[in-house]
């Protein structure tokens, strides 16, 4: 079997179990060899192990003759933007995004700021396993430059893509919950510069994530919802650990999953760019199709994974994309998911339409969703998936990634996670009861197949 190190979004592992400093140095050699003495940006999230791994990565990279521009702690989308802005050959981010505190990881970006395509991941993996490293003599080692105070360049770029005057006029009150992640050093400042009164919670950078888990799942965002209500805010926004995802809370204290916020932005963009192509992974709600039909837009479905979405956007010239998990991709800024620009766009939509966030949500077609997961070892996943493909052939379905079944105006997506030993079962329907029954149907199907495959 082909040995893989990269998952859906880079390399991930538990610190000092799967991911040791020795491993990271060796990955630095493999990545540096791939970039062949180039100029690379590097940055990290605020995890307890991130500084350590950033230094280990720099050691490997510099040994191969690559020079490194170190921006320190920064959101993943800021690192991606700055890579392109400074016209560097690529970049490396030390982050485990939304994973629990004991994890860390490595993401690698090309010169365009987008994560490297799958075929380049394979080249780096080959360098790693074959140990074919470009280790240069002492006088050709790379240099390390500290790049301080660069986050304002990223924030200024976001501001250029929204109507700052229109947002400023509204003096919105916004609660920001970066969940002790790196969004704490960008989003509150961005929104203040947009004239908002910003109230923060969980907004000290802390790699132990003492307040909530870095995953902005709705059950982790109760404090955000209650704070929005308590301070009578117009909006709340929460990020994952590396601030490339945004989950919104409306002014009534109701949290909305990424499908809804994505659909609001999709509708706004289709009104100004009729006929635009929207790229979206199979994990998205049928809402994306409803909005495209109503406002005139073309949908291109992809496998799940922000890298695949970003690369597909470039290929088909798509202006916008979103993922159900709160990832918003806005190509005029950069076709990568970006928690900062999502918050700014949402405020612009509220300002331009004069509507509250709950009004914007209520205008959308209604779907009820149930998200479930079931444990399944990574070894067993391919066998279970094969059987699933056999068992579901009678349904209308998409088989791009896992299986998405369309049943009774609803859908069930069953797919193995790329980062965890689980199968995810996402169901949606026009009524809550139907969504629950589809979820139970999907869970039973997978549970039985896992049993049969053992
Ligand atoms: Mg993330």
Image (cartoon, rainbow, N blue to C red):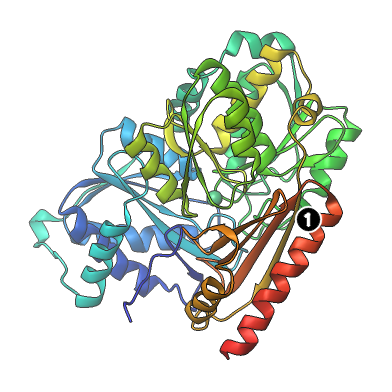
Residue 13 seen = yes
Left or right of 412 in this view: 272: left
Residue 344 seen = no
Q: Is residue 391 above or below residue 161?
A: below
What residue lies at 40% left-to-right and 38% top-to-bottom? 313
Residue 218, image x, y percentages:
76, 51
Count of all numbered marks drawn on residues in the image? 1
Q: What residue would you read off at disc 1?
A: 435
Q: Where does the N terminus fall, quadrant-wise?
A: bottom left
Q: Quadrant location of residue 312?
A: top left
> Which residue is more in the foreground, 283 or 185?
283
Q: Is residue 237 above or below residue 363?
A: below
What residue lies at 78% left-to-right and 41% top-to-bottom? 255
Q: Secondary structure at mark 1?
A: helix
Residue 11, image x, y percentages:
42, 64
What residue lies at 46% left-to-right and 26% top-to-bottom? 276
Q: Where does the C terminus fall, quadrant-wise?
A: bottom right
Left or right of 158 in this view: 214: right
> Which residue is more in the foreground, 207 or 261?
261
> Which residue is more in the foreground, 202 or 174?
174
Q: Is residue 324 above or below residue 171?
A: below
Q: Is residue 108 above or below residue 26?
A: above
User: How many neighbours does mark 1 have within 10 angstroms: few (below 14), some (14-19), or many (20 or more)?
Assistant: many
Residue 144, image x, y percentages:
27, 48
Left or right of 56 in this view: 304: right
What residue lies at 63% left-to-right and 26% top-to-bottom? 294
């Amino acid at each position: 079997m082909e040995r893989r190190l990269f998952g859906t979004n880079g390399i991930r592992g538990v610190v000092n179990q799967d991911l040791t400093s020795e491993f990271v140095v060796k990955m630095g050699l493999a990545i540096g060899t791939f970039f062949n003495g180039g100029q690379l940006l590097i940055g990290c999230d605020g995890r307890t192990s991130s500084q350590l791994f950033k230094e280990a990565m720099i050691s490997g990279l510099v040994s191969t003759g690559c020079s490194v521009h170190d921006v320190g702690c920064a959101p993943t989308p800021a690192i991606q933007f700055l890579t392109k802005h400074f016209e560097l050959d690529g970049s490396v981010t030390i982050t485990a995004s939304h994973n629990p505190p004991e994890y860390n990881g490595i993401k690698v970006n090309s010169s365009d700021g987008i994560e490297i395509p799958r075929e380049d991941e394979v080249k780096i993996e080959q360098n790693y396993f074959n140990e074919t490293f470009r280790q240069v003599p002492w006088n050709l080692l790379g240099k390390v430059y500290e790049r301080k105070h660069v986050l304002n360049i990223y924030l200024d770029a976001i501001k250029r893509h929204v109507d700052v005057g229109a947002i400023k006029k509204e003096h919105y009150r916004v609660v920001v919950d970066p969940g002790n992640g790196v969004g704490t050093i960008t989003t509150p400042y961005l929104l203040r510069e947009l004239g908002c009164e910003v109230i923060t919670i969980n907004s000290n950078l802390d790699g132990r994530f003492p307040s909530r888990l870095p995953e902005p799942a709705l059950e982790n965002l109760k404090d955000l919802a209650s704070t929005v209500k308590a301070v009578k805010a117009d909006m709340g926004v929460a990020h994952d650990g590396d601030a490339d995802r945004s989950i919104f809370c409306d002014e009534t204290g109701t949290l909305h999953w990424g499908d809804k916020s994505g659909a609001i932005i999709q509708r706004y963009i289709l009104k100004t760019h009729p006929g635009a192509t929207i790229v979206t992974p199979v994990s998205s709600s049928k809402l994306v199709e409803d909005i495209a039909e109503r406002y005139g837009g073309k949908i291109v479905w992809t496998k799940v994974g922000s890298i695949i979405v970003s690369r597909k956007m470039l290929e088909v010239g798509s202006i916008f994309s979103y993922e159900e998990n709160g990832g918003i991709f806005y190509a005029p800024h950069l076709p990568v998911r970006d928690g900062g620009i999502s918050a700014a766009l949402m405020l612009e939509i509220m300002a331009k339409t004069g509507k509250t966030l709950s009004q914007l949500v209520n205008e959308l077609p209604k779907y009820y969703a149930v998200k479930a997961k079931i444990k399944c070892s990574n070894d067993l996943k391919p066998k279970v998936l094969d059987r699933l493909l056999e068992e579901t052939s009678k349904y209308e379905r998409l088989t791009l990634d896992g299986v998405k079944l369309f049943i009774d105006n609803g859908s069930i997506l069953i797919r193995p996670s790329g980062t965890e030993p689980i199968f995810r079962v996402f169901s949606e329907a026009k009524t809550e009861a139907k969504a629950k029954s589809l979820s139970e149907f999907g869970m039973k199907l997978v549970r039985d197949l896992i049993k049969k495959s053992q």
